[in-house]
Image (spheres, rainbow, N blue to C red):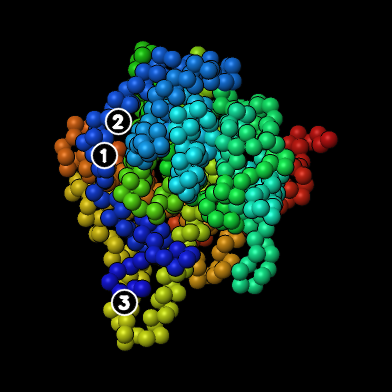
């Protein structure tokens, strides 16, 4: 339906209100960002600082991240301490023995954890962010009552079992299979790889192929189903801990299932709807990665600044040198943007929205790449000291490398963002085609569309002054987002008209679409947050304004470069040819620069 306002559509026909989806349609849905939300109650504001303080003290006094890295484990006393703090059930409702935090409260705790020990963060995250998250969001009341109390207390630890040797990002291709028995129970066989907590978990969310009969056609098809599996069922074994580059204190192992009996009541969700359950879990859990890594970045910036303001070279502290100042400024700008997005997404979730999958994916992509950038620059500022184990920076660098890979590689998530956004634009164009068949009945909408497209062509689009929620001192930055969105929407439309259904195969183009939307969303989030600081007269308001303005100017440069590449100023054809040649040659094979070809 089009009357009254602009909407985007999901694959099942439901309207999407997502900020990022709107960007693909050339729109800035500022109600999704402005005013920057505040969702904590007075009770939250009293309780959360107490929990943050106790968690901080635990990591300061009882957790030795470098020792954990050497021993490749979190010691028993550390696990006990985490359980006593309630860290294994942060979002489990009080009725089931958990702390019952909102998403924003959970984000704040993960930020603390991310600033101290990412490996411990993986143990806890694999347990509750994905391990038993399916029970929390898709389980029935009986399943919740049976499993959540022991999981919330840490009496039992959970793991998420999706990845297999032949199926990483392509989750639909899993081979693990569950066969239903005449009494309704199931028998599970197969194996999973790289399972966090796999060596000691007692409860597993397992995804397996199952035979499903189409109710209309009678045709039998394989579809993924999610199951709650207990180690105590029998037939569940695991391999030795993997020897990893980073997050070494977390346990990662293969998990094997041999004739595992599963009760009928342990199907999670519906039979054949397991892929949907998996996506719900991953989409819901990704937002926490942004807040976790914001904590990591803030800790690293503190280390970089402490060193830069003390280290002297050529008679000056190195923080006085322009290139060091440039690094610190860009590290801080990007961290401010990440933190702004992470808490914006958590707040939108707390307000009851179920349309956050794109923004959660943006947080994961931007967060993991920002943390890598900040860690690398911190190591560079610390120079030789940063390369030494004692500072802890080299450990963080090793720990961070996996974050761009697990829970959806950044390449796959860029495709998710771009293809979902393109789908919204495609649905809008189909709607326009429909109303053009009855122009008199839909004259208002047609004139609106005409004005919007004329605006795209002239650079005077209707969205150019729509960020009314931005503080007046940030008006110029707000206009960058609005004009960027209008130009982006026009390019997405052109791409759809040119490539039609084949656009799904244009991965270099889709990557650029995703990156434009990531830049624009991060810019909007920083403007919204800095606007609140200015409006409320917060002590840091002037500094936040500087951060937002500088970040948006840099973001505009990135957006304009990407739009030029989308318009054809790229080397995509040559890149394809070069890559195909290298693969055909089975590696780098060119003539020797000194004439000594072997």
Q: Residue at x 33, y 51 (%)?
A: 352
As drawn, 218 above or below 262? below
Q: In which quarter of the image is residue 307?
A: top left
Q: Which residue is drawn at 63% across and 57% down?
A: 223
Whether tag 1 and tag 2 are in contact, CB under 8 A, the answer is: yes
Q: What element carries label 1?
A: loop
Can you give x and y, in whole percent of width and height, for residue 327 in the image?
A: 40, 30
Instruction: From the top left corner, tell me how far across and down residue 244 is, in percent.
Output: 63, 27
Q: In this view, does 187 lie above or below 116?
A: below
For label 3, count other residues whose C-alpha is less than 10 Å away and answer few (under 14), some (14-19) or many (20+): some
Secondary structure type for disc 2: helix
Residue 536 in sight here = yes
Whichever of labels 1 and 2 marks the residue nearer the N terminus, that label is 1
Choose between 145 and 101: the one closer to the eye.
145
Residue 118 at least partly seen? no
Q: Which of marks 3 and 2 is nearer the N terminus?
A: 2
Where does the N terminus fall, quadrant-wise? Answer: bottom left
Rendered location of residue 394, percent (x, y): 53, 22
Residue holding disc 1: 40
82 vs 146, nearest the viewer: 146
Q: Is residue 380 left or right of residue 48?
A: right
Mark 2: few, some, or many residues within 10 Å (few <14, many ≥20)? some
How many angstroms separate mark 1 from mark 2 (CA)?
9 Å
The residue indicated by pointer 2 is 48
């Amino acid at each position: 339906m089009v009357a009254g306002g602009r909407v985007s559509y999901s694959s099942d026909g439901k309207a999407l209100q997502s900020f990022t989806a709107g960007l693909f349609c050339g729109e800035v849905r500022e109600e999704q960002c402005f005013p920057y939300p505040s969702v904590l109650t007075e009770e939250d504001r009293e309780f959360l600082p107490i929990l943050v303080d106790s968690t901080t003290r635990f990591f300061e006094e009882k957790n030795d991240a470098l020792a954990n890295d050497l021993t490749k484990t979190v010691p028993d006393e550390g696990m006990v301490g985490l359980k006593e703090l309630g860290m294994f059930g942060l979002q489990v409702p009080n009725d089931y023995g958990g702390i019952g935090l909102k998403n924003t409260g959970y984000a704040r705790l993960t930020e603390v954890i991310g600033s101290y020990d990412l490996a411990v963060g993986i143990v806890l995250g694999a347990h509750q962010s994905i391990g038993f998250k399916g029970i929390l969001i898709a389980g029935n009341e009986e399943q919740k009552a049976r499993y959540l109390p022991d999981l919330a207390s840490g009496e039992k630890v959970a793991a998420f079992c999706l990845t297999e040797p032949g199926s990483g990002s392509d989750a639909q291709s899993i081979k693990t299979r569950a066969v239903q028995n005449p009494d309704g129970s199931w028998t599970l066989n197969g194996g999973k790889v790289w399972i966090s907590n796999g060596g000691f978990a007692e409860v597993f969310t397992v995804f397996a192929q199952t035979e499903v009969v189409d109710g209309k056609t009678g045709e039998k098809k394989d579809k993924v189903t999610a199951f709650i599996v207990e180690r105590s069922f029998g037939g569940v074994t695991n391999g030795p801990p993997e020897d990893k580059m980073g997050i070494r204190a977390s346990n990662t192992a293969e998990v094997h299932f041999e004739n595992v009996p599963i009760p009928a009541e342990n199907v999670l969700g519906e039979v054949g709807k397991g892929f949907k359950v998996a996506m719900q879990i991953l989409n819901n859990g990704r937002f926490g990665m942004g807040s976790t890594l914001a904590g990591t970045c803030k800790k690293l910036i503190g280390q970089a600044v402490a060193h830069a303001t003390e280290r002297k070279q050529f008679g000056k502290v190195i923080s006085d040198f322009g290139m060091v100042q440039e690094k610190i400024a860009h590290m801080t700008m990007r961290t401010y943007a990440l933190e702004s997005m992470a808490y914006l997404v958590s707040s939108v979730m707390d307000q009851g929205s179920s349309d956050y999958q794109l923004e959660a994916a943006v947080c994961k992509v931007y967060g993991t790449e920002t943390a890598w950038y900040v860690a690398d620059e911190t190591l560079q500022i610390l120079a030789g000291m940063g390369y030494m184990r004692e500072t802890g920076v080299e450990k963080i660098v090793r720990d961070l490398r996996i974050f761009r890979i697990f829970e959806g590689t950044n390449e796959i998530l860029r495709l998710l963002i771009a293809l979902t956004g393109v789908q919204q634009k495609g649905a809008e164009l189909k709607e326009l085609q429909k109303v053009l068949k009855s122009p008199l009945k839909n004259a208002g909408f047609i004139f609106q569309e005409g004005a919007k497209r004329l605006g795209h062509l002239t650079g005077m689009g209707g969205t150019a002054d729509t960020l009314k929620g931005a503080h007046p001192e940030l008006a110029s930055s707000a206009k960058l987002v609005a004009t960027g969105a209008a130009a982006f929407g026009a390019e997405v439309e052109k791409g759809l008209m040119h490539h039609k259904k084949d656009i799904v195969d244009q991965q270099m183009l889709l990557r650029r679409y995703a990156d434009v939307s990531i830049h624009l969303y991060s810019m909007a989030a920083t403007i919204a947050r800095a606007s609140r600081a200015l409006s409320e007269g917060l002590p840091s308001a002037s500094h936040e304004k500087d951060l937002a303005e500088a970040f948006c100017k840099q973001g505009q440069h990135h957006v304009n470069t990407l739009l030029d590449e989308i318009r054809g100023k790229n080397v995509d054809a040559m890149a394809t040819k070069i890559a195909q040649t290298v693969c055909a040659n089975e590696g780098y094979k060119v003539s020797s620069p000194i004439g000594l070809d072997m």
